[in-house]
């Protein structure tokens, strides 16, 4: 099975405020902008857009992110529990349910794993995804 390496990152100037997302999919870069959003939404949007970009199916996706929310939702079973509990978490209704639902739907044709990376460290591809996300904010402010 084809293995596809993905790095994603989201950024927001103010929270909420203008935001950007960036992703690197096997060396190919994509990014986007939202004029009024949150950091968590941009982290999630980066994963969504990266998975949409992948055309090879079936494939095994290795998704790297510095978002504790995204990583923990998958790796600690939060998503499974939220769905079992009618999209309710310990603090009430799950925020951004529509993005989680879209992400899960897009991931269905794939096997996948989520890998936590330390943000703003020496991981070159994570730093590049961060640059793509923050650059979207800069270039859309002009």
Image: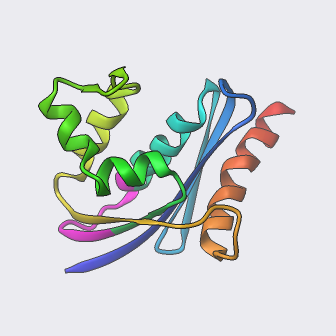
Residue 50 position in % (x across, y down):
43, 55
Direction from residue 72 to residue 127 in the image, left or right: right
Q: Quadrant of the C terminus?
A: top right
Image point (29%, 53%), residue name: 76
Image point (37%, 23%), residue name: 91
Direction from residue 120 to residue 114 in the image, left or right: left
Residue 141 position in % (x across, y down):
82, 32
Q: Is residue 56 above or below residue 3?
A: above
Image point (70%, 63%), residue name: 120
Toward the top, the furthest residue is 92
Direction from residue 55 to residue 140 in the image, left or right: right
Toward the right, the furthest residue is 142
Image point (54%, 58%), residue name: 66
Viewer-side residue, 12 vs 30: 12
Q: Which residues are magenta?
A: 51-61
Residue 1 position in % (x across, y down):
19, 80
Residue 97, quarter of the rendered image = top left
């Amino acid at each position: 099975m084809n293995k596809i390496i993905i790095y994603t990152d989201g950024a927001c100037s103010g929270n909420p405020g203008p935001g950007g997302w960036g992703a690197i999919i096997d060396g190919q870069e994509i990014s986007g902008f939202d004029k009024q959003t949150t950091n968590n939404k941009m982290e999630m949007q980066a994963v969504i857009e990266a998975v949409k970009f992948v055309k090879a199916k079936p494939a095994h996706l290795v998704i790297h992110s510095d978002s504790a929310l995204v990583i923990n939702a998958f790796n600690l079973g939060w998503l499974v529990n939220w769905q079992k509990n009618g999209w309710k978490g310990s603090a009430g209704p799950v925020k951004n349910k529509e993005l989680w639902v879209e992400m899960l739907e897009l991931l269905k044709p794939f096997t996948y794993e989520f890998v936590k990376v330390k943000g703003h460290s020496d991981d070159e591809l994570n730093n590049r995804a961060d640059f793509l996300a923050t650059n979207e904010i800069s270039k859309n402010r002009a």
